[in-house]
Amino acid sequence: MKAYPFLHKHPTTGETTLSQGMDLRDYFAGQALSLLKSKAFLTDDEQSTYATLAYQMADVMMKQREIKDE
């Protein structure tokens, strides 16, 4: 599933195309990451840990959407 699909009109040709936008899971992970990150500077290990946690939270959010849609 995609988040934020939009129509794009080429400035020169005027051709309109549909951009699918980012994956909803990536959007959710980004939102979770903003909550998890409380320090301005993180070590490589901390970055990896926060990224893993963000995607775990995104997966839970995606699963909750499935439950809600049933």
Image: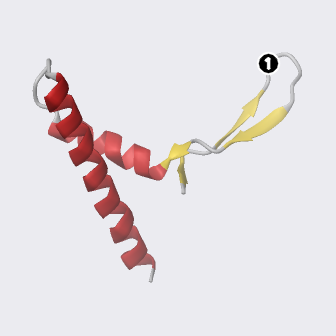
Residue visible at 64% across and 45% down? 20
**Image: 55 above or below 50:** below
The residue closer to the viewer here, 52 or 68, is 52
Q: Is residue 33 left or right of residue 29?
A: left
The image quarter containing residue 49 is top left
Q: Is residue 37 left or right of residue 14?
A: left
Classify the position of the N terminus by image quarter: bottom right
Q: Position of residue 28 (x, y in %)?
A: 36, 49
Residue visible at 38% across and 76% down? 68
Q: Position of residue 26 (x, y in %)?
A: 42, 44
Residue visible at 20% across and 30% down? 47
* Type of amino acid at the residue the image marks with label 1: Pro
The residue indicated by pointer 1 is 11
The image quarter containing residue 11 is top right
**Secondary structure category for the residue under label 1:** loop
Q: Is residue 34 left or right of residue 23?
A: left
